[in-house]
């Protein structure tokens, strides 16, 4: 008998049939004697629909009202899920963020959880109910509704698991777990049985979209095991937890990211503090920068390159124009066709030469490296976007990650695939 | 400068354009220096959509979860309306039933307002905000969301108006006010400038759907003037208030109702207490009965007739079958083709002979009367359903209610008419 927190994403709740399926899963757990808290996202595309509605009356919806609006999506899900559970004769009770005692900071749209007052939740569990909690939302000390930003429901689930000392936090989505590489690109990708928090964080930062970094960080801080699995099968997924194996895999996974652009400022006069000046101005404009490379100085000038999300280019360009003029640099160049490929593995720490091997494999496959950055358990390189597939295949094979089985997209219909590509939380 | 509570029904909020129109109206009031509380229903058909969703996972959704679900409809409206007001540069704040301090009994789906704690609402008004309140909902002392049942948003608005001592409670809908008769049936119907609470209650009970009885009763109890008007024009509507005129109109309006059936139990053995026995059993089955007539006894038996909503027939039939068998009556007959026509007017009290005049007009127009019932300010008769139109026309003309102008359906498009026929609250 365990205490389980199970989080279900919007795709798993996209229509009445799926909601009934999830209810059946919860009831089966209940009948096995487990105590259960289900955390639910908004159904299917409803969050995007609400956003669109908001923008139709106000291009810049006030943050408080937007949170109030978006929070209804999860409140619909929780009530419907409770009804679906009760239809199977098992007592259920839905709790909004407020009722579940999720107290947050007052920063609308990106609130942080300050505290969880679990009295009501644990009381409902003690009464034998399946408790359904609205994800993504909390309440300020003043009683106003807040939302937690992207990935908020995962964060809600892990935070609740920490607060009630759950045995596991299951995160259900439309993928079967964490793979050694994106199986849609590398069909011989292997599902990992388990992975450490640090590796998962590096994979998430490197573009693997399975879990939000924030929830993994929270799980690491509180030692909560996350079980990342599919809502459409009963196959075990991937456990994210503190790894205690004696020998760790050198490379656990390969991630890629095509959402960033590479910017190069050409022929910047090379003097002390020039990088600080460039990136100071960029930071003032609240533009996120990922990798940074400064070339060796030639003839008193240098090139500075960095990567940034393509979505931030609009805000970045005026900053760059002003910077080039002020510093007397030659120009700036934006390349949106690049991709970042990252190897992640806890074993890298104690295995020198992984970077060299990676570079050789890429060179053997005609892939040029634009920029390089490393951490203790990750090596990232920027390459031409069109070479991503061949780079991933070559690295996956060379580092011994290939599975014997070939991945096939699971039983999703066309409509389901459409829902799947819709952004969940 | 007044303190105004303005309630907007679902049709007035059916799409972004209408929401922007309502926001413009609120902002215009604000700029005239009025303090304003807007009470909003759920947008268009969203309540029915949510109900359908609930039934798709549970044929008998648990009451608590259903209230929780339905309440999101008004919460969407209030946030969107606050955004639309803010888009015009006027500060607005949305308050859910909970935040507006609407404390109810714990009877889910049909809660009664127990108390309104207005602190937060009046504080927001004092800060110069337009306050938008979600109608139809409240919260129990334990913090669970409740809904107020059909007509709930009107009730919310009147109750808030009473609690904050508003000067007027404006109820906006898709009709321009209270008419002497349904103008779609009687094009010469006249919009009333004002009408008393009692007359309005009788009209509502007799089938006029403009306002819910509950909100009119509440307004009467607290002396709140209701201004019933159209959200699509600026024409003044009808005031519902305590009439202080010396001479009151004999007949204020004519209502009709085709939603009831007439049931006759034939040849019931006539003995003391027979009616009590019949209607006791019907009451036990929670079936509402409107008019009752017991014929004069012939040969030791009598016929008992009564009217009841057609929607209750399914529950009523087994009761009738059992009753006929137990009492040794001959049979029961159900006639669903009847209609009830009612004359309402405060002046009837002091004008005898109105009933006689009504019966003569109907006879002159070949309309047979099935049943008759009266109150101090109302006379109702049951007639054949197909005679409703000619009866209404004849009575309307004979009692001097005809207008010089001919009513034309207002500027609603086909889509709007579709939304209009959807059941609002």
Image: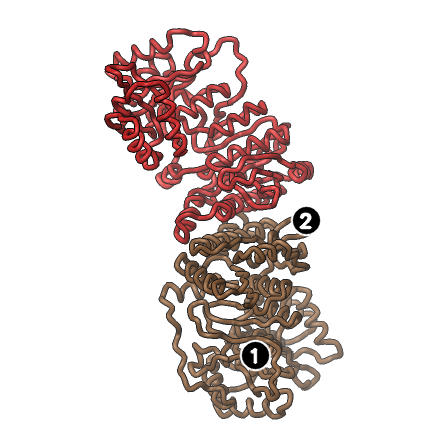
Chain colours: A brown, B red
Residue at 65%, 64% (x, y): give it.
A286
Q: Position of residue B48 (x, y in %)?
A: 41, 44
Residue at horizontal 60 percent and vertical 52 percent from the top: A99
Can you see residue A321? no
Q: How many marks?
A: 2
In the picture shown, does residue A223 fall above or below B233?
Answer: below
Q: Position of residue A151 (x, y in %)?
A: 56, 64
Q: Classify residue B147 as left or right of residue A298.
A: left
Q: Is residue A200 left or right of residue B317?
A: right
Q: Disc 2 sits on a residue from what chain? A: A
Q: Quadrant of residue A298?
A: bottom right
Q: Nearer the viewer, residue A170 or B34?
A: A170
Under tag 1, what secondary structure?
Answer: strand
Q: Give the number of the disc on residue A195.
A: 1
Question: In the image, is A338 to the left or to the right of B32?
Answer: left
Residue A370, relative to residue B128: is it above or below? below
- In this rendering, does residue B68 appear at all? yes
Q: Quadrant of residue B123?
A: top right
Picture disc at residue A142: 2
């Amino acid at each position: 008998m365990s205490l389980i927190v199970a989080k279900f994403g919007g795709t798993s709740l996209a229509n009445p049939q799926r909601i009934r399926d999830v209810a059946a899963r919860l009831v089966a757990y209940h009948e096995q004697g487990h105590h259960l808290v289900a955390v639910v996202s908004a159904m299917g595309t409803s969050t995007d629909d609400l956003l669109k509605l908001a923008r139709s009356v106000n291009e810049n919806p006030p943050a408080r009202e937007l949170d109030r609006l978006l929070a209804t999506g999860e409140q619909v899900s929780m009530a419907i899920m409770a009804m679906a559970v009760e239809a199977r004769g098992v007592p259920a009770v839905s709790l909004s963020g407020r009722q579940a005692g999720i107290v947050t900071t007052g920063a609308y749209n990106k609130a942080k959880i300050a505290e969880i007052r679990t009295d009501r939740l644990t009381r409902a569990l003690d009464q034998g109910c399946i408790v359904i909690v609205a994800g993504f939302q909390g309440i300020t000390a003043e009683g106003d509704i807040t939302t937690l930003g992207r990935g908020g429901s995962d964060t809600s689930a892990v935070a609740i698991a920490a607060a009630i000392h759950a045995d596991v936090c299951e995160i259900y989505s439309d993928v079967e777990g964490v793979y050694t590489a994106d199986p849609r690109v590398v069909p011989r990708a292997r599902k990992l049985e388990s992975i450490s928090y640090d590796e998962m964080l590096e994979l998430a930062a490197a573009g693997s979209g399975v879990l939000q970094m924030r929830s993994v960080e929270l799980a690491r801080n509180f030692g909560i095991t996350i079980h990342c699995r599919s809502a459409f099968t009963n196959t075990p997924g991937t456990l994210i937890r503190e790894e205690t194996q004696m020998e760790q895999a050198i490379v656990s996974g390969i991630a890629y990211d095509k959402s960033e652009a590479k910017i190069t400022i050409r022929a910047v006069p090379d003097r002390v503090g020039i990088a600080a000046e460039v990136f100071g101005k960029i930071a003032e404009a609240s533009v996120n920068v990922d990798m940074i490379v400064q070339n060796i100085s030639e003839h008193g000038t240098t090139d500075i390159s960095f990567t940034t999300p393509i979505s931030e280019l609009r805000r970045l360009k005026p900053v760059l124009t002003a910077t080039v003029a002020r510093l007397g640099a030659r120009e700036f160049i934006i390349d949106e066709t690049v991709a970042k490929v990252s190897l992640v593995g806890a074993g890298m720490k104690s295995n020198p030469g992984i970077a060299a091997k990676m570079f050789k494999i890429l060179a053997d496959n005609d892939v040029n490296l634009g920029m390089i950055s490393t951490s203790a358990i990750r090596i990232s390189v920027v390459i031409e976007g069109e070479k991503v597939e061949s780079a991933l295949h070559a690295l996956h094979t060379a580092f011994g990650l290939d599975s014997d089985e070939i991945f096939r997209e699971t039983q999703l219909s066309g409509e389901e695939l459409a829902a799947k590509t819709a952004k969940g939380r």
